[in-house]
Image (tube, grey):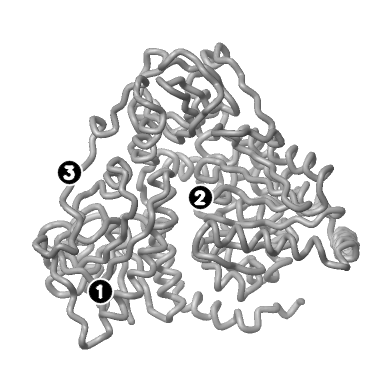
Amino acid sequence: MKILFITDAFNGMAQRLWIELDRRNHEVQVHIPTATDETISAVKEYGPRLIIAPFLTSKIPKEIYDKYICLIVHPGIKGDRGASSLDWAILQEKKTWGVTILEAAEKMDTGAIWASNEFEVRAVTKAEIYRNEVTQMASIGILQAIENFESADFIPEELDYSNTNIKGKWNPKTTQKDYAFSWDNNAVSIIRKINAADSSPGVLISLFKKKYYAYGAHLEDHIKGKTGEIIAQRNHAICIATIDKAIWLTHLKATNNTAIKLPASICFGNKAAAIIQSELDPFTIVNGNTWQEIRFEEKQGVGYIHFDFYNGAMSTNQCNRLRETIIAAKRKVKLIVLMGGQDVWSNGIHLNVIENANKPADESWENINAIDDLILEIITSTSHYIICALQGNAGAGGVSLALAGDKVIARNGIVLNPHTKNMGLFGSEYWTYLLPKRIGIEKANKFTEECLPWGVSMAKDIGLIDDFHGETIVEFSTFVQQQADSILTLSYFDKLLKAKQFQRRKDEMNKPLENYRQEELMKMKTNFYENNLNYNHKRYCFVHKITDETSDIAENLYSSRRNIYRKRKWESINYKDKNE
């Protein structure tokens, strides 16, 4: 079926739906609207049977929904209306929430209902719920809606508030008044408000007589202090006392027009030096709540390393600390599982920290070398077995980080973007060694040029990952633990390591890792210092969330490469390259 996506951005939600529909052989084109007339022309030119809006903040023109069935993905239960659906669900402490697939109508969110599914609301940020539960339910709902669309007998449910099954209602768009709190409030209620506003717009607070938007709140049970004061800092996060406990804030954003979201203490400049350091190494076991960005736990002889980096961005400092943790963990166990965070695995280098640096090119260089050092540590850990367990999405250098492991397992439904070209970068992270090793040189070059997102089913078929399992974090974590335990208890585990050592020596003789690194870094240095692929402009637009002339890349690429992608799927049946 010919389907048109009308979406404000080709974000994680849109990518997940595109992957699911492409797997089922639907022909999907992506359109990012900039003007009403242009959108109308795009629809007329493409002539879809069905239109889907995965992520759209404006109304679909009447000229379109009068002629086509247009399905809107709304992150709310039946009857819920308004632009701040998830915000209100968190603020009002809803135990369950949902995603409803609605038909476009004159009034926003009032159209007939084509599908609706609910989920339990976890006490996490709005962004995490959106990337996980909402995206998962949207995927299920869109597939149900398409099945209904193709059924001659289906009649969509009209929105009728007299129906007792309709629990939702209209809510206004949230403002800062809805998120406002006092540090005299209890910590849990404050965190709920910060979670509701994360990742946008953030909650407005005052620190050092200056206003900031706050993000990334975590409860602290042990550190005490005077209510409302900054009482500690740790790995650039700050800790603020409340009436009962304390709260860690990992990120802040100043209120001026050019401000970007940054690790909290970086926003204070020299003033941060006066804040007391509260160190906590990854191996310290804490009873109760705290914020531990990198955390090690040992279960039945297996070491699990959790690294919960906000939005998956990895600064120079974070890469170095994670590398040091892996080195220390190797002294404790023979099998290590890199778990990432529950929300995001990794998206590579930290573009916001780079943008904020006095010399972005220098910070880019330091950051790429730090992540290279991290990945090198994993590749060369031949005396240990390392599993990379992807609980959330991975992109750019984060995919290479995962491929450095001996076994790569992903949670069902996550999205992989193993490319950096869209950011004006050739890419390093030993991808020219790791990606061809997995899928062959021809496909590695082809897919990094195409810049297409990968679903886990396709990734497994072609050999990018080894397996995927579980719709939830709990299901996935249980599966990972079973896999790790079964590998560690193999009677031939020592032989497995010897085989790994043999393969590494063989690969090194064929071409040293240092050669791969230097070849990649030579091109990256040109990207950073000569800006030959427009990295500076693309990075600036990304961190400032600016739509520029490259914003139509999704439409141009994801429609024009359709036939190539279908060929890629067919090739996955026999994915070995001729040179293998």
Q: Secondary structure at mark 1?
A: helix
Residue 343, disc: 2
Which image quarter is the N terminus in? bottom left
Residue occupying image coordinates x 69% and y 44%: 297
Q: Secondary structure at mark 3?
A: loop
Residue designated by label 3: 172
User: Which image quarter: residue 384?
Assistant: bottom right
Provide residue 512's location: percent of width, then percent of height: 84, 55
75 relative position to 550: left or right: left
Q: Nearer the viewer, residue 311 or 257?
A: 311
C-alpha distance separating marks 2 and 3? 28 Å
Q: Secondary structure at mark 2?
A: loop
Q: Nearer the viewer, residue 348 or 327?
A: 327
Q: Residues within 10 Å of mark 3 (few under 14, many from 20)?
A: few
Q: Amino acid type of disc 3?
A: Pro
Q: Amino acid type of disc 1?
A: Glu
Residue occupying image coordinates x 36% and y 51%: 549
| Residues under numbered marks 2 and 3 in contact, where contact means CB atoms less than 8 Å apart | no
Residue 45, disc: 1
Q: Nearer the viewer, residue 103 or 531?
A: 103
Q: Amino acid type of disc 2?
A: Asp
Provide residue 336's location: percent of width, then percent of height: 75, 52
Any part of residue 526 in sight: yes
